[in-house]
Amino acid sequence: MGLQSSGAISLDDLHVEVGGTSGTTCSLNDPDIRALIDVGSGDGQSIQQYYGKSSETSLPTSGSTVNGQVQLKQISASSYISSGGTLRIPSNMWVWTDSRTTAALTIDIPCTVINDGKIIGQGGRGGTYYGNLSPTSGGPAINVTSSGVTIVNSSGAYIAGGGGGGGKRQDGGDPQDSNAGGGGGAGGGQGGRGWISSHSGENAGTISGTGGALNARGNGSYHRQTNSLNSDNGGGAGGGGGGTQNSGGGGGRILPGSGGVYTTNFVWGTGGSAGNAGYGNNPTPGVSGHVIAGGGGGWGASGGNGVQQTAAGGGAAITGTSRTLSNSGTIYGST
């Protein structure tokens, strides 16, 4: 929390600030205490030099922004603090990733991380009819690779795993009108590609919705017959599934975020909101060709099942080695 800037200050105050136990033995020459004022062993110092010092390091907020958001991408704790230190993520900061296999934050040294901001994983891709690809799972927000780690998630802060991709719609009995791509998961997951038509000008179903930028909805896919953008099936969290030969919508990066859905006479699988799974269903009864692929999962949640394809699971909020967690904020995904 930082030392006082005036008044009485003791060696014990310094010891507690660097993580020591009050009343236990310490000296001004201890390396962790000297690090507060960045002096070497044996260098001259006085206790007054320690006024206002803190063992805590906040992530810098002066770097480049994405969509107007203060951000850092795929970072490690050891890049900012030493073993035993405290790293704080400011309230206006997004720590994020665009990889399902690389966490937004890797905690690779014994330390305390205090999150006042937003730490998010990457969303999974929706299942594709065009290309015949399975949906992919969401990625983790935090990966812990060291022992001795404490994570504090403050009130108003978020730690969110990516949402899983929704399953595609595939119907071998009606291949032209009944195949569609699943929605992308929360965290920027790509929508799955749909059917490529033999009809002139009707190949827009292969153009799937891309994931959203930070604090933005995912992009909708194009309708294969109208060649117009289905803006509503891009989600703030999970993207909506495609219908009638079309591709899925992209997952967004809004917290908490709502799922994407398309609401004309073409029926779509709704994307998951916040920590909720995407919606999956069978074809609408009695309506030929109006079908549903699964929506992408909300933060940390699985996508919706398609027809003949199971959705992918959501990503962990925190994964890796054992750690201590104190949570007063919001967490989506397993810890």
Image (cartoon, rainbow, N blue to C red):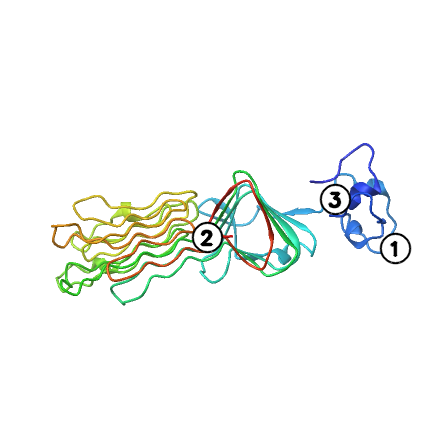
Q: Is residue 321 above or below residue 266?
A: below
Name the residue tied to disc 1.
42
Q: Residue at x 25, y 55 (%)?
A: 293
Q: Quadrant of residue 322?
A: bottom right
Q: Residue at x 19, y 58 (%)?
A: 245
Left or right: 281 as drawn, with respect to 212? left
Q: Secondary structure at mark 3?
A: helix
Q: Mark 2: which amino acid? A: Gly
Q: How many marks?
A: 3
* Residue 161, disc: 2
Question: Which of the two discs, 3 and 1, sits closer to the camera?
Answer: 3
Going from N to C along the chain, the mark reached first, 2 or 3, is 3
Q: Residues within 10 Å of mark 3 (few under 14, many from 20)?
A: many
* Residue 17, disc: 3
Q: Mark 1: which amino acid? A: Gly
Q: Position of residue 96 (x, y in %)?
A: 49, 53
Q: Position of residue 309 (x, y in %)?
A: 28, 62
